[in-house]
Image: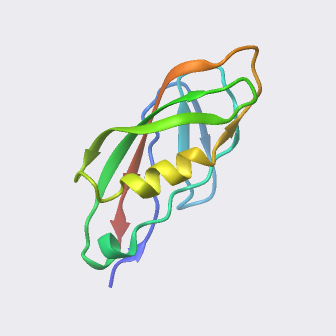
């Protein structure tokens, strides 16, 4: 049986942060420093069926560092990982800023490995 192992690439270029093996890799294109980033849960039904894919989430970050209005910009396969991706990105926090920043996008890859 395949075990859930996260290899996530957040589809933005710039600063690279990485943790332990299997931890998310985060690349940010802007100056909003991540304060808290959590990996999404792999949906059990997708894991049982061996489904892999990705979701691109579009969002804004308000002055206090909270993610605002995350939406699915792209997903493959559609509808399988959407809720898990939105739930994870909604919990992220970034450094405070003078104004809301808009136009952020993050790609979360859902990958199973033996």
Say whether residue 104 is left or right of residue 56.
Answer: right
**Residue 16's quadrant in the figure?**
top right
Q: Is residue 72 above or below residue 49?
A: above
Viewer can see residue 7: no
> 63 or 28, which is in the foreground?
63
Residue 105, position in %: x, y? 45, 30
Residue 50, position in %: x, y? 26, 72
Viewer can see residue 2: yes
Taking the spot 45% from the left edge, 51% from the top edge, the residue there is 85
Residue 101, position in %: x, y? 60, 19
Specify the quadrant that holds the C terminus. Answer: bottom left
**How are the residues colored?**
rainbow
Residue 72, position in %: x, y? 37, 40
> 13 or 60, which is in the foreground?
60
Q: Is residue 103 above or below residue 8?
A: above
Specify the quadrant that holds the N terminus. Answer: bottom left
Q: Residue furthest top?
A: 98
**Residue 49's quadrant in the figure?**
bottom left
Say whether residue 14 is left or right of residue 63.
Answer: left
Taking the spot 42% from the left edge, 38% from the top edge, the residue there is 71
Q: Is residue 27 above or below residue 84?
A: above
Q: Residue furthest front?
A: 69
Taking the spot 69% from the left edge, 29% from the top edge, the residue there is 33
Q: Is residue 50 above or below residue 77?
A: below
């Amino acid at each position: 049986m395949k075990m859930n192992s996260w290899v996530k690439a957040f589809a933005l270029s710039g600063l690279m942060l990485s943790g332990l093996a299997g931890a998310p890799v985060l690349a940010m294109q802007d100056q909003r420093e991540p304060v808290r980033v959590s990996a999404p849960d792999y949906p059990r039904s997708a894991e049982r069926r061996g489904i892999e894919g990705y979701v691109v989430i579009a969002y804004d970050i308000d002055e206090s560092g909270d993610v605002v209005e995350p939406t699915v910009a792209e997903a493959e396969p559609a509808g399988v990982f959407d809720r898990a991706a939105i739930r994870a990105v909604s919990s992220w926090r970034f450094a405070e800023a003078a104004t809301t920043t808009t136009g952020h996008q993050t790609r979360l890859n859902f990958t199973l490995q033996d």
